[in-house]
């Protein structure tokens, strides 16, 4: 059998498709006689735009649309006119949407220019795919890959009706997969959930010419079913909707997840050959993609209320650390690429014992990306740094402990501050967003944090402040009692799909609902404070160090934007207090520490000093606790002017 695996825009062009790489290697193992080819449509689209626009539409424009417009559906809209065979389809709808959301005019101009080239690109893709005479074309679809993939699938079927089209990926999970299938009759099969077991089983049925009724979760067209059987939108029912003389079946999904031992190491050979021969290589730095674990061990017990990731496969499973390192070592040696992106939603804590030490001892100058929880201690963060982690996504989300409780994050605002501080101390880039709009949050939850945000300008700022959106599979979605009782498909889908609302309700991932939590002046103050943080961060430092050989004296150099530039001297119990506040403590707990070390200070005197230090922006107050916000002590010689002394 000849199988073509396809990934369409808007997959990041600097990354290989993990899904394609995994399935390619899997088929090589379980179906060695099959001929498997890959079609990297995302890379082809970036090349096509560069060529057709005479260099105006560059890979940077591709990446901006692919990463920044997910919540506006602009990437899907670029291809919607091709899907619906109407150049004007959705144009007026997008213009109305852009005005209502005050979207950047330059962004709309960019996607409008891209759309002009979409039809010719899809025709060229179809020609290139069909040139290899495939029997099966498998698409992987996540986020804004649906419409480009559907447009190509339709074009392929137009030229080769007997071709078998299969869809899979995150956009096909649960009821979404059945809705995609029954509304697009040129899609023969949809694999819902993980594909390592289902896809080979489907291919075996295609070989045998038998109906795939026993493949868990699979959607397929039944030519023999009861023509009156229209089971509606019951995605896990064998019943389905009718297209002409065919019935869309949706096999019951299995609760069985793919074991780590059955997840192959990806094959990226074809991807590397293509990107190295592409003109796009001049604009990007290729990276490798690896997978150590699936699911979320935190989410199994405390599913963050706003998070819809993992879909129907929350169960946490991880490869042994030795195996993960072996895969990374093999890929790095084979491809000569040191940048490694892990797609795990959360790091397996066992990796601190087996995987990370191997990475640190390898001698490779790795640059790894990882998602972690924000409650890592300083030793764990140091270990990540030593192993080559340069970009971490810790899921900080907020600095208000009560709002974090509403999210079920299991961490405090002060702990998040400590994490930001330790990342800076180990030269680790932190990527995070400040989220708000949670049912039950109040202005009071933000007041104290907003007062203190200017003091944090030297720490890595969030990418922005964003009101949460309702995501399918999140607790907010599955339990309307949590505060979002009214919901409808997000407005952006009106310029993406020509489908009735009841079908969109099953097909899409994002939903609009009534605003919850803060608004008005408090929301405006948060947006303004985060913007100021981002603007001032590059020119701000707050560093604490010992005064030369004098271990008993601490100096704090304040070079933060918006604060008087000065150096503070702390000696005696004050220096000891600052050291203890690296981990955060309440005033009574700190007082017990100090008196236990025979420092002569009263609780009242300590309280007055803590209040002053908070006012100077040297401490972050979270409830009754305080945490210092300066970068940790460094024993280096310094020369300072004693122009300012606190305490």
Image (spheres, grey):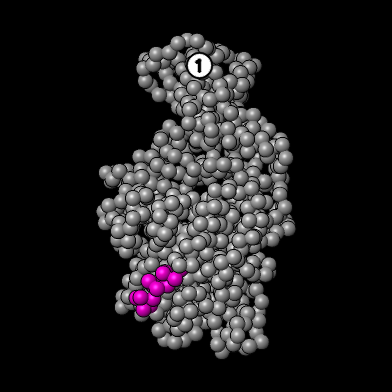
Question: Looking at the image, which residue is at 52% across and 64% down?
Answer: 79
607, above or below 364, in the image: above
The quadrant where residue 274 appears: bottom left
The quadrant where residue 330 appears: bottom left
Give the residue number, with chain letter if any, for mark 1.
566
Question: Looking at the image, which residue is at 55% across and 18% down?
Answer: 564
Q: Is residue 268 left or right of residue 585?
A: left
Does 260 lie within the magenta span?
no
- Stretch of the chain drawn in magenta: 122-134
> Which one is nearer the viewer's eye here, 465 or 256?
465
Does 126 lie within the magenta span?
yes
Instruction: Return the residue found at the far top.
Output: 642
Q: Position of residue 151 (x, y in %)?
A: 51, 70
> Which one is nearer the viewer's eye here, 455 or 123?
123
Q: Is residue 321 left or right of residue 433?
A: left
217, above or below 102, in the image: below
Q: Quadrant of the N terminus?
A: bottom left
Q: Position of residue 582 (x, y in %)?
A: 50, 28
Q: Main secondary structure of the magenta part?
A: helix
Question: Looking at the image, which residue is at 50% across and 10% down?
Answer: 643
145, above or below 369, in the image: below
């Amino acid at each position: 059998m000849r199988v073509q695996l396809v990934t369409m825009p808007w997959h990041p062009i600097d990354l290989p498709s993990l899904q394609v790489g995994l399935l390619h290697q899997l088929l090589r193992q379980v179906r060695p006689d099959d001929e498997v080819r890959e079609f990297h449509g995302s890379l082809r689209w970036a090349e096509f735009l560069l060529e057709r626009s005479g260099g105006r539409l560059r890979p940077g424009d591709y990446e901006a649309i692919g990463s920044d417009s997910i919540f506006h559906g602009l990437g899907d809209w670029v291809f919607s006119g091709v899907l619906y065979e109407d150049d004007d389809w959705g144009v007026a709808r997008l213009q109305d949407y852009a005005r209502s959301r005050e979207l950047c005019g330059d962004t709309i101009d960019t996607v409008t220019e891209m759309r002009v080239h979409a039809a010719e690109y899809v025709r060229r893709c179809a020609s290139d795919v069909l040139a290899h005479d495939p029997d099966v074309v498998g698409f992987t679809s996540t986020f804004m890959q649906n419409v480009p993939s559907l447009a190509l699938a339709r074009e392929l079927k137009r030229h080769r009706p007997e071709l078998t089209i299969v869809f899979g990926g995150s956009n096909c999970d649960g009821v979404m997969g059945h809705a995609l299938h029954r509304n697009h009759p040129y899609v023969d099969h949809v694999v819902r959930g993980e594909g390592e077991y289902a896809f080979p089983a489907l291919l075996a049925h295609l070989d045998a010419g038998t109906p795939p009724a026993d493949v868990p979760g699979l959607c397929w067209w039944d030519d023999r079913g009861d023509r009156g059987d229209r089971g509606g939108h019951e995605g896990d029912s064998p019943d389905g909707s009718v297209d002409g003389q065919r019935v869309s079946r949706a096999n019951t999904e299995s609760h069985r997840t793919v074991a780590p031992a059955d997840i192959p190491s990806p094959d990226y050979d074809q991807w590397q050959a293509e990107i190295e021969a592409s003109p796009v290589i001049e604009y990007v730095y290729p990276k490798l993609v690896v997978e150590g674990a699936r699911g979320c061990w935190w989410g199994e017990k405390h599913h963050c209320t706003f998070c819809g990731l993992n879909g129907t496969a929350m169960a946490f499973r991880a490869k042994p650390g030795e195996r993960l390192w072996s895969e990374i070592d093999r890929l790095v040696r084979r491809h000569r690429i040191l940048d490694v992106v892990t797609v795990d939603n959360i790091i397996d804590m066992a990796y601190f014992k087996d995987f990370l030490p191997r990475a640190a001892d390898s001698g490779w100058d790795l640059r790894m990306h990882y998602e972690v929880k924000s409650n890592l201690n300083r030793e764990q963060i140091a270990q990540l740094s030593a192993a080559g982690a340069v970009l971490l996504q810790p899921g900080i989300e907020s600095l208000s402990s009560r709002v974090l409780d509403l999210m079920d994050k299991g961490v405090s605002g002060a702990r998040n501050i400590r994490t930001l501080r330790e990342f800076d101390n180990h030269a680790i880039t932190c990527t995070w967003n400040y989220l708000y709009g949670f049912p039950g949050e109040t202005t009071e939850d933000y007041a104290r944090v907003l007062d203190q945000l200017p003091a944090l300008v030297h720490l890595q700022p969030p990418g922005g402040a964003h009101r949460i959106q309702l995501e399918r599979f999140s607790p907010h979605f599955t339990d309307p009692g949590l505060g979002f009782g009214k919901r409808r498909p997000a407005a952006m889908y009106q310029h993406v799909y020509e489908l009735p609302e009841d079908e969109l309700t099953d097909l899409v991932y994002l939903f609009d609902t009534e605003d919850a939590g803060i608004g008005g002046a408090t929301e405006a103050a948060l947006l303004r404070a985060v913007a100021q943080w981002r603007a001032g961060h590059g020119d701000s430092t707050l560093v604490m160090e010992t005064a030369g050989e004098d271990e008993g004296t601490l100096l704090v150099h304040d070079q933060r934007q918006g604060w008087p530039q000065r150096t503070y001297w702390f000696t005696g119990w004050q220096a000891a207090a600052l050291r203890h506040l690296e981990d955060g403590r309440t005033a009574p707990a700190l007082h017990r520490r100090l008196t236990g070390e025979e420092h002569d200070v009263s609780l009242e005197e300590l309280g007055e000093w803590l209040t002053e230090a908070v006012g100077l922006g040297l401490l972050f107050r979270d409830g009754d606790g305080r945490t210092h916000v300066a970068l940790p002590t460094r024993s280096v010689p310094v020369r300072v002017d004693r122009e300012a002394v606190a305490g």
